[in-house]
Image (tube, rainbow, N blue to C red):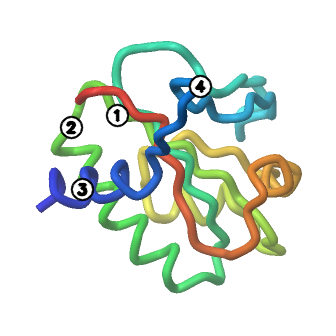
């Protein structure tokens, strides 16, 4: 089931162009622990950028499925939880649910960079799992 979901996610977001590979826009933000992270990163594996908010029911449902995928694909899958449009404490939300995502608590600026206009979304930087 998770392989099918991941395949569908990747298939929907892969773009064919004459110029070759389409690269995700680069950005640098602070993780919840204060350490800065620059994405996308070059490595073997898959990175998923999950734009989410604590009040979003679709995000909550998707987070459960993504957590299951992390268990299944222990190595090679990293999920970046990019918190957007949220008045709640994203660190508390994640801690209460014990998600193993890399939390980026203030990612509103990345919405514009990715021209992201809705509340539910994920963007995988695809590699083979």
In the orientation shown, which residue stands out farthest toward the left? Answer: 1
**What residue appears at the point 26 percent right and 27 percent down from the top-left corner?**
128
Q: Which mark is residue 73?
A: 2
Q: Which residue is mark 4?
A: 19
Q: For the residues marked 2 and 4, what is the alpha-carbon distance in whole angstroms? A: 31 Å
Q: Which mark is in front, 1 or 3?
A: 1
Near-viewer residue (88 or 6)? 6
Image location (x, y in percent) of residue 37: 71, 24
Mark 3 lies on residue: 68
Residue 77, label in figure: 1
Gap in angstroms between the C-alphas marked 1 and 3 = 11 Å
Q: Nearer the viewer, mark 4 or mark 3?
A: 4
Give the Cα separation between the discs numbered 1 and 4.
27 Å
Q: Quadrant of residue 34?
A: top right
Q: Is residue 121 left or right of residue 61?
A: right
On the picture, is 29 further left or further right than 125?
Answer: right
Q: Which mark is residue 116?
A: none
Task: Describe the element under mark 2 as helix, strand or loop.
Answer: loop
Placement of 71 over or under 108, stated as above or below: above
Sequence-wise, the earlier of marks 1 and 4 is 4
- Looking at the picture, tell me which residue is in the foreground, 59 or 117: 117
Q: Secondary structure at mark 3?
A: helix
Instruction: Kindly give the residue lying farthest to the top in the view shown.
Output: 43
For the C terminus, the quadrant is top left
Q: Give the camera-side residue of 39 and 127.
A: 127
Q: Residues within 10 Å of mark 3 (few under 14, many from 20)?
A: some
Q: Earlier in the sequence, mark 3 or mark 2?
A: 3
Residue 30 spot, x, y in % from top left: 79, 33
């Amino acid at each position: 089931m998770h392989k099918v979901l991941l395949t569908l996610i990747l298939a929907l977001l892969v773009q064919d162009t004459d110029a070759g590979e389409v690269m995700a826009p680069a950005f640098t933000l602070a993780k919840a622990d204060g350490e800065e992270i620059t994405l996308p990163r070059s490595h073997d594996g898959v990175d998923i950028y999950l734009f989410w908010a604590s009040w979003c029911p679709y995000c909550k449902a998707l987070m459960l499925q993504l957590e299951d995928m992390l268990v299944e694909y222990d190595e090679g899958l990293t999920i970046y939880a990019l918190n957007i449009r949220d008045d709640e404490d994203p660190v508390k939300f994640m801690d209460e649910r014990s998600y193993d995502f890399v939390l980026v608590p203030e990612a509103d600026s990345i919405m514009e960079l990715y021209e992201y206009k809705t509340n539910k979304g994920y963007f995988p930087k695809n590699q083979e799992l």
